[in-house]
Image (cartoon, helix red, strand yellow):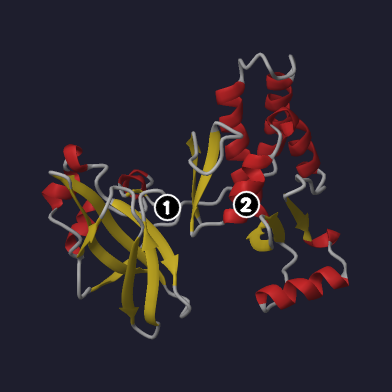
């Protein structure tokens, strides 16, 4: 899982801080950003005691808090047993939605999100007077419990050729449906948009790949990928196919004289 803490997320106005993940975990995103900011020191304390918390709409459960009926229901939803090091997340948006995440991943994400909350809201006068001090204390305790997860470097296996690489769109932030074929995966469909993607430069700055490697595999010319003027034109998403393979999709949206287009630079099998 790749994630990034962001400011002013588009999916909620309840917090100035959000989280973006690839592959996406919508349930986790909404759980974290729906929590009450003033209660975060308490949330961290409960997390350290392996106590679950949440809101009326979103919550989570540790493995040890699930009885046999809960675990049976989990099997019906996910088609497998829940593992002891996993957490189940629940979101209700008119219907019940579930996702699952490793406990260590959850702790790391919660720490990074809470740290950004402290940075953004430290001087907020609407919060309790001792909020920042309590946050610092609990974050210090939580940091000791983290299992540091090294950034995974992407291995670019091969570029998958497309029958059509440029798509006409009606406006800048339209959703473009892309279909491609992966070996042993058959037909794979994915939606491309600015909202659900990240700048390609993030992968390079996090040392998960290099522009040189991307150029070698045929994404674009190295001078274009290295260009500061074009740095934020390249976007990416990472998806998983049903064949247990992951794919990196690099694309952009451009406007020229009121004409909009989406260009796909490559669908790359990664490992």
Q: Which mark is residue 196?
A: 1
Mark 1 surroundings within 10 Å by alpha-carbon count, few (fewer than 14), some (14 through 19), many (20 or more):
some
Give the side of residue 29 with respect to residue 253, left or right: right
* Element under disc 1: loop
CA distance for labels 2 and 1: 15 Å
| Label at residue 28 | 2
| Vertical placement of residue 8 versus 207, above or below | above
Between 51 and 198, the one nearer to me in the picture: 198
Count of numbered circles in the view: 2
> What is the number of the mark on residue 230?
none
Instruction: From the top left corner, tell me how far across and down residue 215 is, in percent.
Output: 18, 58
In-image side of 6 versus 148 (left or right):
left
Whichever of callouts 2 and 1 sits on the residue coming sooner in the sequence is 2
Residue 127 in percent (x, y) is at 70, 19
Q: Nearer the viewer, residue 92 or 213?
A: 92
Q: Residue at x 31, y 75 (%)?
A: 180
Horizontally, residue 103 falls left or right of residue 120, namely right
Q: Reply above or below: 52 against 128.
A: below
Q: Is residue 53 visible?
A: yes
Crowd around label 2: few <14 · some 14–19 · many ≥20 (10 Å)? many
Nearer the camera: disc 2 or disc 1? 1
Vertical side of 241 occupied by 59: above or below: above
């Amino acid at each position: 899982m790749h994630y990034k803490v962001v400011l002013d997320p588009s999916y909620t106005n309840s917090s100035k801080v959000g989280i973006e993940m690839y592959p996406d975990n919508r349930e986790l995103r909404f759980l974290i950003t729906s929590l009450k900011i003033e209660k975060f020191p308490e949330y961290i304390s409960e997390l350290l005691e392996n106590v679950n918390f949440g809101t009326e709409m979103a919550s989570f459960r540790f493995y040890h808090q699930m009885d046999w009926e809960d675990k049976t229901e989990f099997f019906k939803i996910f088609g497998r047993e829940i593992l002891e090091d996993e957490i189940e997340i629940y979101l209700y948006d008119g219907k019940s939605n579930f996702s699952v995440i490793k406990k260590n991943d959850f702790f790391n994400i919660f720490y990074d999100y809470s740290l950004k909350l402290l940075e953004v809201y430290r001087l907020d006068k609407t919060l309790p007077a001792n909020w920042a001090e309590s946050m610092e204390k609990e974050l210090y305790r939580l940091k000791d419990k983290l299992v540091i997860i090294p950034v995974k470097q992407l291995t670019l296996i091969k570029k998958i050729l497309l029958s059509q690489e440029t798509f006409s769109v009606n406006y800048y932030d339209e959703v473009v449906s892309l279909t491609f074929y992966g070996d042993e995966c058959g037909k794979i469909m994915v939606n491309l948009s600015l909202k659900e993607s990240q700048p390609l430069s993030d992968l390079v700055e996090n040392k998960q790949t290099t522009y040189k490697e991307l150029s070698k595999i045929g994404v674009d010319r190295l001078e274009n990928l290295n260009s500061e003027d074009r740095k934020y034109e390249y976007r990416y998403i990472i998806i998983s196919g049903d064949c247990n393979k992951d794919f990196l999709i690099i694309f952009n949206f451009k406007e020229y004289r009121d004409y909009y287009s989406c260009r796909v630079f490559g669908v790359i099998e990664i490992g």
